[in-house]
Image (cartoon, rainbow, N blue to C red):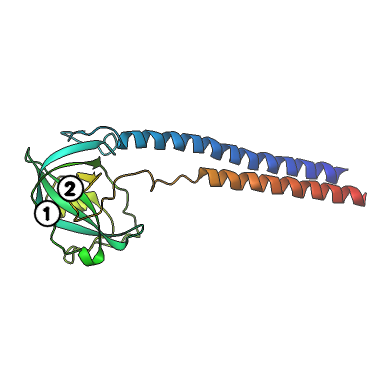
Amino acid sequence: MRRVIFLCLVGGLGLAVLLSLGIWQMQRLSWKQGILATIESRIAAAPTPLPATPDPEADKYRPVEVSGHFLPEEIHVITSAKDLGPGYRIISGFETDAGRRIMIDRGFVTSPKRDAERPKGAATLVGNLHWPDEVDSFTPEADVAGNIWYARDVPAMAAVLGTEPLLVVLRETPDNSTHALPVSTATIANDHLQYAITWFSLALIWAAMTVAFLLRTRAKT
């Protein structure tokens, strides 16, 4: 009898823990979906003029419109694009009509087009402000001399290009020299549903094992 009570206690406690973890992940899923919906609405909003003092938190994903001209210097960031293969993001310096120097993420080119000539004239551009979180302790150091970068490190790129630490990722390219890689929520992890399914599956297995042990224990008594 004591063994049956012990199994019931352990089984019930384990089941409660696993179910609570699954419920928590479902709550996290709802929270993350709300965050993603807010980000998507901000990304798709009508563009506004470039803010005077952009804030990396408050202005992240803000759609802006800028007019000016491309500067000759550019940075090449190694990446890959679906259906296009390996290549580079092209980050160009850009001087606005107001005299501000910022950076423009012009989009993607395949490796053979890395050194191709790209238009440098006047342009009016629409894109989103972005401060990508792509640098960690495993990111190789950029080869500045060879112009090979492994992440969009906004402060470091701005120092090399002589611009504000301000990056605008184009929604569409003004020409055919690059393939636009606009800001989206696709790269923001949202695995809470998978985690919830895992915890609920473990809860079901735990419950089945508990019942099996109880039946075996009763059969022996």
**Residue closest to the eye, 164 or 46:** 46
Cα–Cα gap, marks 2 and 1: 9 Å
**Residue closest to the eye, 10 or 73:** 73
- The crowding category of the residue bearing disc 1, from other C-alpha atoms within 10 Å (few below 14, some 14 to 19, many at least 20), is some
What label sits on residue 174 in the rendered view?
Answer: 2
What is the x, y in percent for residue 196? 57, 43
Is 51 on the left-hand or right-hand side of 187? left
Give the residue drawn at x 69%, y 42%. Answer: 15
Is 15 on the left-hand or right-hand side of 81? right
Residue type at tag 2: Pro
Whether 128 is drawn above or below 160: the answer is above
What is the x, y in percent for residue 140? 30, 62
What is the x, y in percent for residue 115? 16, 64
What label sits on residue 98 in the rendered view?
Answer: none
Where residue 139 sits, quadrant-wise, is: bottom left
Residue type at tag 1: Pro
What is the x, y in percent for residue 160? 15, 55
Q: At numbered mark 1, what does the secondary structure look like: helix, strand or loop?
A: loop
**Residue closest to the eye, 141 or 65:** 65
Q: At numbered mark 2, what does the secondary structure look like: helix, strand or loop?
A: loop
Pick the quarter of the image with the N terminus.
Answer: top right
Whether 205 is drawn above or below 57: the answer is below
Where residue 52 sits, quadrant-wise, is: top left
Give the residue drawn at x 32%, y 48%. Answer: 133
Question: Do residues under tags 2 and 1 come within 8 Å of each other at their CB atoms?
Answer: yes
Q: Residue furthest right?
A: 221
- The crowding category of the residue bearing disc 2, from other C-alpha atoms within 10 Å (few below 14, some 14 to 19, many at least 20), is some
Whether 169 is drawn above or below 83: the answer is above
Give the residue drawn at x 69%, y 43%. Answer: 14
Q: Earlier in the sequence, mark 2 or mark 1?
A: 1
Pointer 1: what residue? 119
